[in-house]
Image: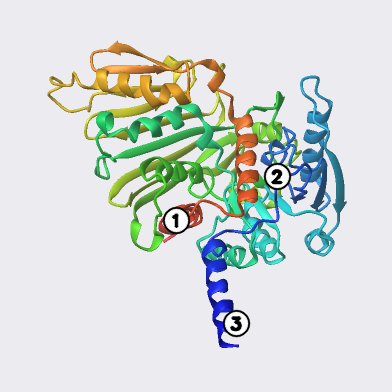
Amino acid sequence: MKKNLAFTIVLAIMLCLLGCNETKSNFTGAADEVKLLTLDPGHFHAALVQKTMYDQVSPVVHVYAPKGADVQDHLTRIVGFNMRDDSPTTWDEKVYTGDDFLDRMIAEKKGNVVVISGKNSKKTDYIYKAVDAGFNILADKPMVISPDKFHLLIDSFERAEKKGVLLYDVMTERHEITTMLQKELANTPALFGQIKKGTPDKPGITKESVHHFFKYVAGNPIKRPGWFFDPAQRGEGLVDVSTHLVDLIQWECFPGKIIDYKKDIQMLSAKRWATDMTLDEFKKVTHLDAVPDYLKKYADGDKLGAVSNGEMVYKIKGVHAKVSVTWNYQAPKGAGDTHYSIMRGTQCNIIIQQGKDEGYKPTLYVEAPDVEPLEGREYIGPALAKAVDGDLQKKYPGISIEKIAENKWKVNIPKKYHVGHESHFAQVTEKYLGYLVDGKLPDWEVPNMIAKYYTTTQALKMVNE
């Protein structure tokens, strides 16, 4: 008896050693095993997840939403994807609209992955309730817009771990080619050295983006819902688009490293400002005949002020970082949303610019540090050539460098890598599908998502104090 007991204990220990560290998954990568549920789609990003078909995802998608223009606009976009001439999709949308849409989705359990992209004011509550019901979640940014709801998001992540489901946000900008190469070069010590700590006036890393209310998506002029201009429903620039920029700072400066929001983040300054548009411009982009009551406090005569812009300066693991988001009404002809980024290294700077000189296309530059003297910088060219001709050429065949000025180089990137913002949604979704099969996210993703939303909500808290 004792021998049998001892053998059983040893066997149990061996099995644990072999399998306890393995994460079980309900997904195998089989065709149609992922069944999407779309919850209250109010933003066009919900549709862009379905601009592409995926072998692993069933074409039948159940949509749960309140009645109204938001869900109708979403379904119109899906129909457009299904009816296009080039690579049409075959989505079959099953729609339920009613006041109890959330409860109905939870009760029916007709899917296993919930896509959430709509009113940001409701998103944190949606996430918590869906996770609690045992659903995996692919959520558009931002997951939270209010400092008061930050800890509810933390609770959601903790509950997701207990339930064995994956909660993930859609960080499309990680798939933009100039950003990917900026990250690669900044993590090449022979070229870049190390990121400078910087100062509040001259941060080690700066990211700025300019967006536009009126633009074209999937070839059609965008229709914004009225609530998109209400900071209480959509969130301000500090907690909305800034999410992408804060994420990229973490992802590029500290790849694969866990960021502890309690000790690694220190907010230094934050500010906000509004973008004015005429009421005719507002009506053009929303298709509304009048300004809704909830926006009238932002109206002054023929002008409507959209509280959409923000800037923050903070320290992350000792590095000064700056994030700025600006919204204009419409881009100049030939232009679109733009991105600027500079990473200051001890040996060179790596810059993304997307202005008029670049034809409004994101372009990557490497230059000597902006300090005198510039003599003795001969190492930059050879170090850059070695980096590009080595591992980067294997990952991204066809890239090259061009010297355009003394101590300044441009990285030439083949057109095939500039796939566009809308295509990034499929790339993110494919990565998430892989995580579902793995049964887990990378170890750093959850703590860094928490750190990211701590940063944005702390910026908003600062401007409100």
In the picture, which quadrant includes the C terminus?
A: bottom left
Q: Which residue is mark 2?
A: 29
Amino acid bearing label 3: Asn
Residue at image mark 1: 451
Disc 3 element? helix
Residue at 24%, 44% in the rendered image: 199
Does 194 appear above or below 137? above
Residue 146: quadrant of the picture? bottom right
Q: Position of residue 433 (x, y in %)?
A: 65, 44
Between marks 1 and 3 in the image, the one whose residue lies nearer the viewer = 3
Say which mark, if any, is on residue 83: none
* Residue 262 image offset from top left, x and y in percent: 38, 63
CA–CA distance in space, label 2 to label 1: 31 Å
- The residue under the point 47% across, 15% down is 398
- Check disc 2: other Cα within 10 Å, few if <14, some if 14-19, many if 20+: some
* Residue 446 % position (x, y): 51, 56
Q: Are marks 2 and 1 in contact (CB under 8 Å)?
A: no
Circle 2: element type? loop
Tell me the quarter of the picture where residue 11 sits.
bottom right
